[in-house]
């Protein structure tokens, strides 16, 4: 299934030297060095996770993508602001060691990036557009745009200043801005009105006070206007970015998220976000078609990146980034970041991940950072996770107490509950 071309059908795919060289109903495999049997599965372009945190060993949130990529189909990892101008080079160098995985970065407008949990845009002098633009220019094609986190303790008292600075830096190099929304101030309408076509609003399904859905359950007119002029809406599930109620209101209002991303980091990886396929399964529960869900993790994020990687499609001549998935039927319960749950009759489970023609081998799960608090049940599930890696935790962890205690109480308050 390739939403970029609209192709959908049953065929063999032959890969050589990292590229797709043939697609036909039957391709003789006698001479092949290896065969991946995808009978009963759906073969997708390698997934692009547009919002992750992969500056591990150097930041509060960072995770190593290698123990996750091989079992999730994610071949392109886009880091969303873990690094700023001062540590972008470290992320770039680390990314080279993770080949064949592809990595791109949104650079934080705060020069220190996300070394700590929060507070990076509180100090005005750290948000210097010229310094940010110079770092982006120095790392050319590695950079996808500028990240700016707003709200709560992150930008406390700074209002729209960090966002204006991020836009100034982005304009200097012709890149998009990814704006993070959470608990205001600032006001969500003011944020959305500043965003330009091609800019991205992440955590678009947040249930916090900057929600794009108003208290009556309607999509705000500022959000509809922004979408109309080409602002992209990205899920960024994370540990506060996904509310089933808000997502339902969005879909009911005809606003489909352009991009589904995991916001994978040290907290969300232990649930209820878990990984990108689990986030995708939640949108199947909400009634989005498989094709629309796949579009939101392939061709749409590829366009958000300016298509420069050539990822997001399956056709002869394109790079052999492929993800083999099974749609597993059963009775599963999936939770949002406020521990509201929905029954899911189907889960997307990855069966093979191929990057530039390389079938990724299994890599054991990494232990959580020692500053991440886990519940007793989470700790006891660590062994099980190792045994059921492709079925990470969605099936085995089905009770709210299995998850990380939400760091954000929610849904925020009764009258914001939609
Ligand atoms: Zn994030």
Image (tube, rainbow, N blue to C red):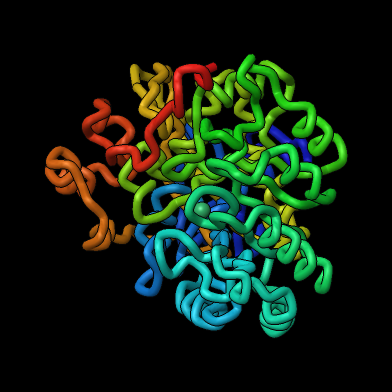
- Residue closer to the observer: 33 or 42: 42
Q: Is residue 21 visible?
A: no
Q: Residue furthest right?
A: 229
Question: Along the horizontal axis of the image, is 320 left or right of 165?
Answer: left
In percent of the image, x 55 and y 81: which residue is there?
A: 86
- Residue closer to the observer: 368 or 150: 150
Determine whether 345 is above or below 42 in the image: above
x and y percentages locating residue 256 in the rendered image: 69, 29
In percent of the image, x 65 and y 53: which residue is there?
A: 159
Determine whether 152 is above or below 174 in the image: above
x and y percentages locating residue 122 in the rendered image: 55, 64
Determine whether 153 is above or below 136 in the image: above
x and y percentages locating residue 269 in the rendered image: 36, 48
Q: Is residue 213 visible?
A: yes
- Residue closer to the observer: 329 or 267: 267
Question: Along the horizontal axis of the image, is 381 left or right of 395?
Answer: left
In percent of the image, x 55 and y 28: which residue is there?
A: 283
x and y percentages locating residue 243 in the rendered image: 50, 29
**Quarter of the image with the C terminus in it:** top right
In percent of the image, x 45 and y 29: which residue is there?
A: 412
**Quarter of the image with the N terminus in it:** top right
Question: Along the horizontal axis of the image, is 289 left or right of 57?
Answer: right
Quarter holding residue 9? top right
How many tags in the picture?
0
Determine whether 206 is above or below 319 in the image: above
Quarter holding residue 307? bottom right
């Amino acid at each position: 299934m390739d939403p970029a071309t609209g192709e959908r059908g049953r065929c063999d795919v032959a890969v050589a030297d990292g590229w797709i060289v043939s697609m036909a109903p039957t391709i003789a495999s006698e001479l092949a060095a290896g065969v991946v049997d995808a009978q009963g599965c759906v073969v997708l372009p390698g997934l692009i996770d547009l919002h992750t945190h992969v500056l591990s060993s150097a930041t509060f949130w960072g995770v190593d993508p290698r123990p996750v990529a091989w079992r999730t189909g994610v071949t392109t990892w886009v880091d969303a602001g873990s690094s700023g101008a001062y540590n972008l080079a470290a992320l770039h160098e680390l990314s080279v060691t993770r080949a064949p995985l592809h990595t791109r970065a949104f650079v934080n407008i705060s020069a220190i990036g996300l070394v700590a949990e929060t507070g990076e845009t509180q100090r005005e002098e750290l948000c210097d557009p010229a310094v940010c633009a110079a770092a982006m220019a120095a790392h050319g094609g590695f950079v996808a745009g500028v990240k700016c986190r707003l709200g709560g303790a992150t930008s406390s008292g700074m209002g729209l200043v960090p966002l204006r600075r991020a836009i100034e830096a982005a304009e200097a190099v012709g890149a998009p801005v990814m704006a993070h929304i959470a608990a205001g101030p600032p006001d969500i309408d003011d944020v959305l009105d500043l965003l330009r076509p091609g800019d991205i609003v992440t955590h678009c399904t947040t249930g916090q006070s900057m929600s794009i859905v108003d208290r009556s359950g309607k999509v705000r007119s500022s959000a509809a206007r922004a979408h109309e002029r080409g602002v992209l809406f990205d899920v960024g599930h994370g540990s506060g970015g996904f509310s089933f109620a808000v997502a339902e209101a969005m879909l009911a209002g005809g606003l489909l998220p352009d991009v589904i991303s995991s916001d994978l980091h040290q907290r969300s990886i232990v649930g209820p976000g878990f990984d990108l396929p689990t986030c995708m399964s939640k949108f199947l529960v909400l009634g989005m078609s498989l094709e629309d869900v796949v579009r939101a993790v392939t061709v749409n994020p590829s366009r958000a990146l300016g298509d420069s990687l050539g990822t997001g499609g399956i056709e002869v001549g394109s790079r052999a980034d492929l993800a083999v998935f099974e749609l597993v039927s059963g009775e599963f319960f999936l939770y949002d970041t406020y521990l509201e749950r929905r029954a899911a009759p189907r889960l997307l489970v990855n069966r093979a991940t191929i990057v530039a023609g390389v079938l990724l081998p299994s890599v054991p799960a990494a232990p959580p950072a020692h500053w991440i608090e886990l519940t007793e049940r989470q700790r006891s599930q660590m062994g099980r996770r190792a045994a059921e890696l492709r079925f990470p935790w969605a099936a085995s962890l089905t009770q709210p107490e299995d998850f990380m205690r939400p760091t954000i109480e929610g849904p925020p308050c009764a009258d914001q509950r939609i």
